Amino acid sequence: MSYRSEHQNLDNIFLRNIKFSKREKVAIQGLTDFSIIPSLSEKLKEDNRIAIISKDRRGDKNILNYLKEFGGEDLFTSLVWDLRRIKRLKDEQFNTIALIGIGDLEREPIPSLSSYFRLLKEGGRFMIVMEKSDRNDIFLRRLLYEAEMGEMIGLLEKVGFSKRFYLKRIATNFIEALIITALKTGINISLYFQ
């Protein structure tokens, strides 16, 4: 069995499916397997900057220690994000925000999605890499199709993302996953639903 087949997780699925453009600024939240950082750095283009997001100081310290060992401090940075801190960041900083796993998003979907929307540049993309399961299918339906009972609009569209999203299914011998990509449009319609 090869290394790749033994280590099929959401982090590796993200790694295999992400593509960068020149001068793109990217935020990645939910990364748990820091060993993909060297492979991630090989995919970078000219002037890319990657922020690896953690939800607490301990996670931030782990990321910083790994980056010091790897020597990726010039390409990668570490940020601590929670809903309180994320509100302090300036608007339209990132071309791409990638969320690996949906645990944090499930707890507070509208405030989280609104923050991601605000931090994305116009035309930016928001990626969610999630495990496919019956439990997650319920949240996926809310995310894409029906935010609340009877609504014909999903959470992504409700906060302003384009109603045209992209869904990619990935199945391996070890994991079944989905990658959802939504694009930022010009207006945050969540302001009209508060």
Image (spheres, helix red, strand yellow):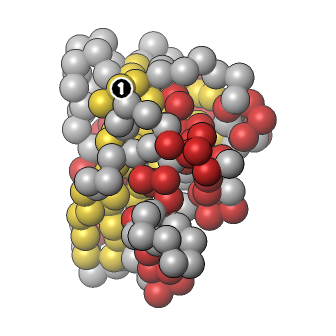
Decide: is 181 above or below 174. above
Left of 112 or right of it: where is 4?
left
| Residue under the image location 52 percent in, 29 percent down | 119
Image location (x, y in percent) of residue 170:
25, 70
**Crowd band around label 1 with a 10 angstrom C-alpha radius: few (<14), some (14–19), many (20+):** some
Decide: is 194 above or below 186. below
Q: Which of the pair 58/86 is nearer the observer?
A: 86
Image location (x, y in percent) of residue 121:
40, 24
Question: Can the viewer see residue 30?
Answer: yes
Decide: is 23 above or below 35. above
Name the residue type under label 1.
Glu
How many numbered markers are drawn? 1
Q: Mark 1 points at which residue?
A: 122
Image location (x, y in percent) of residue 59:
69, 41
| Residue under the image location 22 percent in, 38 percent down | 19
Residue 178: quadrant of the picture:
bottom left
